[in-house]
């Protein structure tokens, strides 16, 4: 027998709020005072004190599935539901009922999500979310969006944290850029737990993607990234998210028009953010991300105002060498040419004119061969500038 709506005495339930498997579990009725604990759980946070009957939930949320199974007592429908959700090999359900079917689908043990049936609130939202997941797997994106919208409406009054996460999922699915940012903003405003950090990162990325040359939007993206750090994205807890955030934060600063007294500070923060990202993006573990962040760092080092420009230029040249060593000219000749042009510019500023001329000449040829007319013209201007600089220093071409 699987639990019916009447059998679920604790409402609202934190279903969907925590990562699986805890996000699949149901809290049983308890005689202890549970209001404060339930409020924390609904926000996606584990309280310091839980009713004894809910200790299994805390263990599951901490990844201690075996311990959670040991804590589960009784053989009532909710206990059986939780054992199935935790993957107990001895657990046997009735193969009937919405929540049991939902668990099987969420754990990859069934091909189809269940229908919504009798449920309401956060329970209905959970089933609708799974239906949306199935629609996405079938590339039925508009249907998935409609299901997520229904799920958000169902969860909004009973589980704000779950509604916030669903809004983030809808925003990720949305193709209309005019809707993406408002959805992300609403998600961040609703979230009160750990999800707020991830949703702030998502908001920053949405703002940055649509900002163009709009400085106000870019500044809002920067604030969203800073909020994500403040709300809990760390290199220890979420290294990939931390690196993505730091890289994007740097790009946001570098993408702003440089017209004010705060420009040197922004450039300095951008360089520091890229160095933070590169603590995660190593050449061995993340070769593409490493190369991209290194390139952004080298480009920034060329232009950051400093009392020791030569040191920055030398470091930039060395970084370009590292990237050129792993970038294949045949695979991406235009990207390779851009690297050469950037390195040539740094070399020229260091007064190393011979190698600078060799590299910009090769870049010019590649741009010409691949009909990148504007880039070829820019490279030719740099050739002329290097020639003039060399004449000024050496008195000859």
Image (cartoon, rainbow, N blue to C red):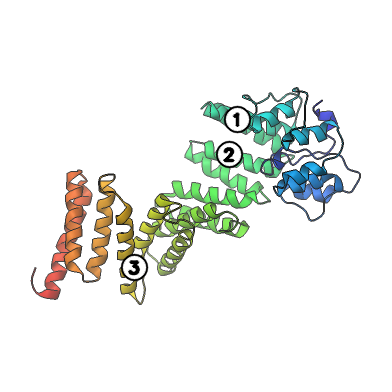
Label 1 sits on a secondary structure element that is helix
- Residue 348 at least partly seen: yes
Residue 375 in percent (x, y) is at 23, 51
Which one is in front, 190 or 8? 8
One can see residue 150 in this view: no
Q: Earlier in the sequence, mark 3 or mark 1?
A: 1
Residue 23 locus on image (x, y percent): 70, 40
Residue 149 in the image: state x and y as whole percent: 62, 33
Residue bearing mark 1: 132
Q: Is residue 140 left or right of residue 56?
A: left
Residue drawn at x 75%, y 51% as measured from the top left: 46
> If you read the primary sequence from the N terminus, does the residue marked by circle 2 or circle 3 appear first?
2
Along the horizontal axis of the image, is 139 left or right of 80?
Answer: left
Q: Residue furthest left?
A: 396
Residue at x 38%, y 53% (from the top left corner): 292
For the C terminus, the image quarter is bottom left
State yes or no: discs 1 and 2 in contact (Cβ < 8 Å): yes
Badge 1 or badge 2: first in the primary sequence: 1
Q: Quadrant of residue 161?
A: top right
Residue at mark 3? 315
| Of 301 and 49, the residue lying toward us | 49
Question: Comparing marks 3 and 1, which lies closer to the viewer?
Answer: 3
Please, is residue 118 above or below residue 164 in the view?
above
At a point 61% along the width and 45% down the height, the residue shown is 186
The quadrant of the image that shows the N terminus is: top right
Residue pointed to by mark 2: 169
Rounded to the nearest whole Å, what is the CA distance between mark 2 and mark 3? 41 Å
Q: CA distance from mark 1 to mark 2?
A: 10 Å
- Secondary structure of the residue carrying tag 2 is helix
Q: Which residue sits furthest bottom?
A: 307
């Amino acid at each position: 027998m699987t639990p019916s709506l009447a059998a679920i005495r604790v409402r609202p339930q934190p279903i969907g709020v925590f990562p699986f498997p805890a996000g699949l579990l149901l809290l049983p009725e308890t005689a202890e005072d549970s209001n404060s604990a339930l409020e924390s759980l609904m926000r996606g946070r584990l309280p310091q004190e839980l009713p004894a009957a809910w200790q299994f939930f805390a263990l599951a949320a901490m990844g201690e599935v075996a311990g959670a199974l040991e804590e589960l007592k009784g053989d009532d429908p909710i206990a059986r539901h939780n054992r199935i959700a935790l993957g107990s090999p001895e657990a046997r359900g009735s193969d009937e009922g919405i929540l049991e079917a939902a668990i099987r689908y969420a754990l990859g043990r069934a091909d189809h999500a269940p229908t919504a049936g009798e449920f309401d609130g956060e329970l209905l939202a959970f089933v609708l979310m799974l239906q949306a997941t199935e629609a996405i797997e079938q590339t039925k994106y508009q249907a998935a969006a409609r299901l997520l919208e229904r799920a958000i409406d169902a969860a909004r009054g009973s589980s704000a944290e779950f509604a916030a996460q669903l809004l983030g999922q809808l925003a990720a699915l949305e193709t209309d850029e005019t809707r993406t940012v408002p959805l992300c903003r609403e998600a961040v405003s609703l979230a009160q737990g750990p999800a707020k950090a991830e949703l702030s990162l998502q908001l920053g990325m949405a703002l940055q993607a649509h900002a163009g040359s709009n400085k106000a939007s870019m500044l809002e993206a920067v604030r969203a990234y800073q909020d994500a750090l403040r709300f809990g994205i760390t290199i220890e807890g979420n290294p990939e998210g931390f690196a993505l955030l730091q890289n994007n934060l740097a790009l946001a600063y570098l993408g702003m028009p440089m017209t004010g007294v705060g420009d040197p500070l922004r450039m300095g923060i951008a360089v520091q953010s890229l160095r933070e990202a590169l603590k995660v993006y190593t050449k061995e573990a993340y070769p593409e991300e490493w190369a991209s962040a290194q390139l952004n760092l080298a480009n920034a080092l060329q232009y950051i105002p400093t009392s020791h420009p030569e040191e920055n230029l030398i470091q930039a040249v060395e970084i370009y060498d590292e990237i050129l060593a792993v970038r294949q000219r045949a695979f991406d000749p235009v990207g390779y040419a851009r690297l050469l042009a950037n390195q040539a510019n740094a070399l020229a500023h260091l007064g190393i004119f011979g190698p600078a001329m060799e590299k910009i000449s090769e870049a010019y040829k590649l741009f010409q061969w691949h009909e990148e007319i504007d880039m070829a013209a820019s490279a030719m201007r740099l050739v002329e500038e290097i020639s003039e600089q060399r004449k000024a220093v050496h008195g000859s071409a």
